[in-house]
Image (cartoon, rainbow, N blue to C red):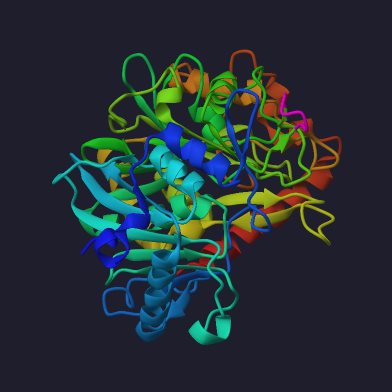
């Protein structure tokens, strides 16, 4: 039974409207403002990012044993879910207008899900047209629904929830309900989480990663947490973008789950990221929580008065250099992007398979001083599989899959520090984007194949002795620090935290 069949009052459903009509509806309904190039500029209110503590999965025999409940995933009873679902459908049915889209996620030739989406927001319907792929009749492995009711007034006591914000998925009903937040990332990540739950049983590795390919169709994958450079580095001149954030790896190769991009916009400029900048400043581009001038003549991407997590959504068709099929070959190289604010990891190192699995389980980056109240020095943060909030199963499930692919296809894995050198945050400097780009481009051009490597004493990483155009002083972290003893103290402390985290993750 589809969503429209459940909604008795079909007359209020605006079905698969063209993006121009959705833009017009969004403006008429005062959901957003029009930017200087015709962008739709949305403010999401109190939620400018994911509601990490408000994620639920409905208890059912299909999910109980497989879900990684310790990963801040809340349990909802089937009775509470049924009551909530009935109330939300009743609420949607009472609205003057709701917006319905049919989309898909994944690849019809490998694995895909049909998506039926209904929302009170025209702008959210536009977002789904960008982030998800066109619906393909009779070509999906299964179908899921999203009930999007951000303004539904939820009483936490009635449904046993932590707050009036809820993102809940029932694998029995094949439905996600989103309440209490206008942040569009919840729509995108809810379906990513579903794919992450389903695909391992098919031997497919879901990846929180970007991907691109070069002129000879060699594929490259970029794992990384938000803010480490995943979108920026996968969208590079001279390479074709497969996708910026969500992919699967099967024996047929890499495939993009999505039909669009959801890029961070803070400090976005044409000079540093021309493709993303141009895609973000087109007619009907979708912008969240960015600063629009009062006279609507300009957008200041360097203004973080709303949040540093400003976002841009646009279809892949807005990127000129892209892979139309959204698919690539088995990757020759995989990059782990880590913004090390301690400044002790090298800018690049080659991992053996054991290290590759350990760093995959770690998903290491660092919180910076000043980003949260009370943080005076960098703090190590770990997000297993480089995307723990979206991984519904234990990291061992995903790491076992990755290990099999690394062994089977002899894939190289590189650890790339997009963070600091010469000292920790506040003392050292951040690696310039042009340095990181140069390193990755040389790996993609096979220029490091014949370079000799040295072993780092603390982390046991293989570090290239020479990279064309890169100061050799930068390659060995200790050499760029003023005080070697300070480096050794911090590096050893971080290495110990790695060991502790890996022990804590054991089943």
Residue closer to the observer: 401 or 278 = 278
Q: Which residues are magenta?
A: 293-298
Q: Percent x, y for residue 152?
A: 53, 68
| Figure quadrant of residue 20 | top left
Q: Is residue 295 magenta?
A: yes
Q: How many marks?
A: 0
For the C terminus, the quadrant is bottom left
* Left/right of residue 146 with respect to residue 471 in the rendered view: left
- Left/right placement of residue 469 relative to residue 176 reads right
247 left or right, relative to 311? left
Q: Residue at x 28, y 29 (%)?
A: 329
Is 194 situated above or below 107? below
Q: Is residue 72 shown to the viewer in this render? A: yes
Residue 303: quadrant of the picture? top right
- Nearer to me, 52 or 487: 52
Q: Is residue 175 left or right of residue 123?
A: left
Q: Quadrant of the N terminus?
A: bottom left
């Amino acid at each position: 039974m589809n969503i429209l069949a459940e909604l008795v009052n079909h007359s209020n459903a605006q079905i698969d409207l063209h993006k121009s009509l959705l833009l017009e509806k969004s403006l008429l309904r005062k959901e957003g403002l029009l930017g200087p190039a015709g962008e739709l500029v949305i403010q999401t209110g109190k939620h400018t990012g994911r509601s990490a503590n408000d994620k639920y999965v409905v208890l059912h025999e299909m999910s109980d044993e497989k879900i990684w409940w310790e990963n801040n995933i809340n349990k909802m009873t089937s009775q509470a879910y049924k009551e909530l679902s009935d109330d939300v459908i009743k609420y949607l049915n009472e609205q003057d207008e709701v917006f319905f889209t049919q989309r898909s996620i994944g690849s019809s030739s490998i694995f895909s899900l049909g998506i039926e989406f209904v929302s009170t927001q025209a702008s959210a319907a536009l977002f789904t047209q960008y982030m998800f792929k066109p619906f393909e009749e009779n070509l999906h492995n299964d179908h899921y629904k999203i009930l999007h009711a951000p303004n539904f007034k939820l009483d936490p006591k009635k449904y046993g929830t932590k707050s009036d914000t809820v993102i809940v998925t029932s694998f029995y009903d094949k439905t996600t309900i989103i309440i209490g937040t206008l942040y569009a990332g919840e729509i995108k990540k809810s379906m990513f989480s579903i794919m992450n739950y389903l695909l391992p049983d098919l031997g497919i590795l879901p990846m929180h990663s970007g991907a691109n390919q070069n002129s000879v169709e060699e594929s490259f994958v970029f794992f990384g947490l938000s803010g480490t450079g995943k979108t920026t580095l996968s969208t590079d001149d001279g390479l074709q973008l497969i996708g910026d954030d969500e992919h699967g790896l099967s024996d047929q190769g890499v495939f993009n789950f999505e039909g669009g991009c959801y890029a961070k916009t803070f400090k976005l400029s044409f000079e540093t990221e021309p493709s993303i900048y141009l895609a973000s400043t087109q007619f009907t581009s979708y912008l969240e929580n960015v600063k629009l001038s009062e006279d609507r003549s300009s957008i200041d991407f360097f203004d973080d008065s709303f949040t540093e997590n400003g976002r841009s959504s646009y279809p892949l068709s807005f990127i000129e250099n892209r892979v139309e099929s959204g698919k690539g070959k088995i990757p020759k190289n995989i990059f782990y992007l880590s913004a090390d604010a301690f400044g002790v990891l090298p800018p690049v190192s080659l991992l053996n398979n054991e290290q590759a699995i350990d760093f995959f389980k770690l998903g290491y980056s660092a919180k910076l001083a000043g980003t949260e109240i009370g943080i005076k020095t960098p703090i190590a943060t770990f997000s297993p599989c480089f995307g723990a909030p979206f991984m519904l199963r234990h990291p061992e499930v995903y790491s076992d899959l990755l290990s099999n692919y690394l062994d089977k296809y002899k894939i190289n894995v590189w650890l790339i520090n997009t963070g600091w050198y010469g000292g920790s945050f506040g003392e050292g400097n951040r690696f310039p984007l042009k340095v990181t780009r140069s390193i990755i481009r040389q790996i993609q051009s096979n220029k490091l194949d014949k370079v000799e490597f040295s072993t780092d004493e603390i982390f046991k990483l293989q570090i290239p002795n020479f990279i064309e155009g890169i100061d050799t002083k930068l390659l060995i972290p200790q050499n760029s620090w003023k005080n070697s003893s300070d480096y050794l103290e911090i590096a050893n402390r971080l290495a110990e935290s790695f060991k502790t985290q890996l022990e804590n993750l054991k089943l």
